[in-house]
Image (cartoon, rainbow, N blue to C red):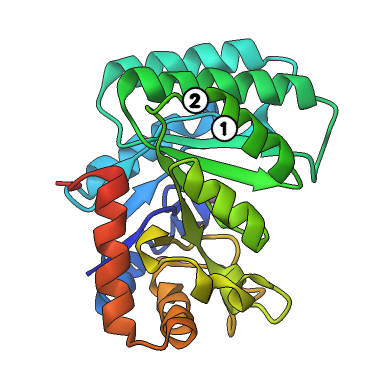
């Protein structure tokens, strides 16, 4: 069994073939999917999709850093309200992104800290997005970690040193399509990271692994990520699937 720990199956890119996409995922052993929210405009879709696949899809709630704009306080209030209305399996996706825009850097930090504190209060894991913000995110995690934070640095693209720091901060590394990229770099040091601290994910429909780079991503392609990890760790894909599923449950719970 494989758990795709970060997949946006609720977005419109899957409206035409969601059932078939899920079936293809199951054909390669993916049985559970964690769905990170994006912002207030995606909550309805997120919940409709999760509820259509009970016991298979598990929603997280959060405000994505690229959706932090002038109206961020209203956005946060909507996310907080949603969190109070039903159970969620994590706070996500949250984090900081300076790749697209740094105009709201200060607001991004405030929103990130607020959501980290919700995770602590609710005892939920976090799914963290980092783009050109490794130093900032690691600093904030260091300041906010009081023993109650756990989660995943989703789509990990950092250095070996940043990976070690993440582990020290009680974070797991979310390994996605980047591990299959020729210039992805993380494949060069992952064998020095304990496999117990890795989870796998697709971030579908984005970040498609090789050999399908450029096409729409889908959870079935997690196979290429598992295969690559097996090669890096000198073991079998079956063993990687089993270990990373166990790890995902350590972070997110039994998911039933
Ligand atoms: Ni994502």
Q: Nearer the viewer, residue 145 or 11?
A: 145
Mark 2 surroundings: few (<14), some (14-19) or many (≥20) residues within 10 A = many
Mark 1: secondary structure: helix
> Do the residues bearing badges 2 and 1 touch, measured as CB atoms within 8 Å?
yes
Q: Residue 105 sits in which quadrant?
A: top right
Residue 157 visible in the displayed image? no
Number of residues whose C-alpha sits closer than 10 Å to that of mark 1, classed few (under 14), some (14–19) or many (20 or more): some
The answer to whether mark 1 is within 8 Å of ligand 1 is no
* Residue, far right: 103
Q: Which residue position is annotated with label 2?
A: 116
Q: Position of residue 88 (x, y in %)?
A: 30, 31
Look at 22% across and 53% down and name the residue there: 56
Task: From the image, tell me which residue sits under label 1.
Answer: 141
* Image location of residue 130, percent across then percent down: 65, 45
Query: Residue 161: where, in percent of width, then height?
Result: 65, 57
Q: Would residue 3 be found to the left or right of residue 174 on screen? A: left
Left or right: where 169 falls relative to 199: right
Left or right for 61, reference 27: right
């Amino acid at each position: 069994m494989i758990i795709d720990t970060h997949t946006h199956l609720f977005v419109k890119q899957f409206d035409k073939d969601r059932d078939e996409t899920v079936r293809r995922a199951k054909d390669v052993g993916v049985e559970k999917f964690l769905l990170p929210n994006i912002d207030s405009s995606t909550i309805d879709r997120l919940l409709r999709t999760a509820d259509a696949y009970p016991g298979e899809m598990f929603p997280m709630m959060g405000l994505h850093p690229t959706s932090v704009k002038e109206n961020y306080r209203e956005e946060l209030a909507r996310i907080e309200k949603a969190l109070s209305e039903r159970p969620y399996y994590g706070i996500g996706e949250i984090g900081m992104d300076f790749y697209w825009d740094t105009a709201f850097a200060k607001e991004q930090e405030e929103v990130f800290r607020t959501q980290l504190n919700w995770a602590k209060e609710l005892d939920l894991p976090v799914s963290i997005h980092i783009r050109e913000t490794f130093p900032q995110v690691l600093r904030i995690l260091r300041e906010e970690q009081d023993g109650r934070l756990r989660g995943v640095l989703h789509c990990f693209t950092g250095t070996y040193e940043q990976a070690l720091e993440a582990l020290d901060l009680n974070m797991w590394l979310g390994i996605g399509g980047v591990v299959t990229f020729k210039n992805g770099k993380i494949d060069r040091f992952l064998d020095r990271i304990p496999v117990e601290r890795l989870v796998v994910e697709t971030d579908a429909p984005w970040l498609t692994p090789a050999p399908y780079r450029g096409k729409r991503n889908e959870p079935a392609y997690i196979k290429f990520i598992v295969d690559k990890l097996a090669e890096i760790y000198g073991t079998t894909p079956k063993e990687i699937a089993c270990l990373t599923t166990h790890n995902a449950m350590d972070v997110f719970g039994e998911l039933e």
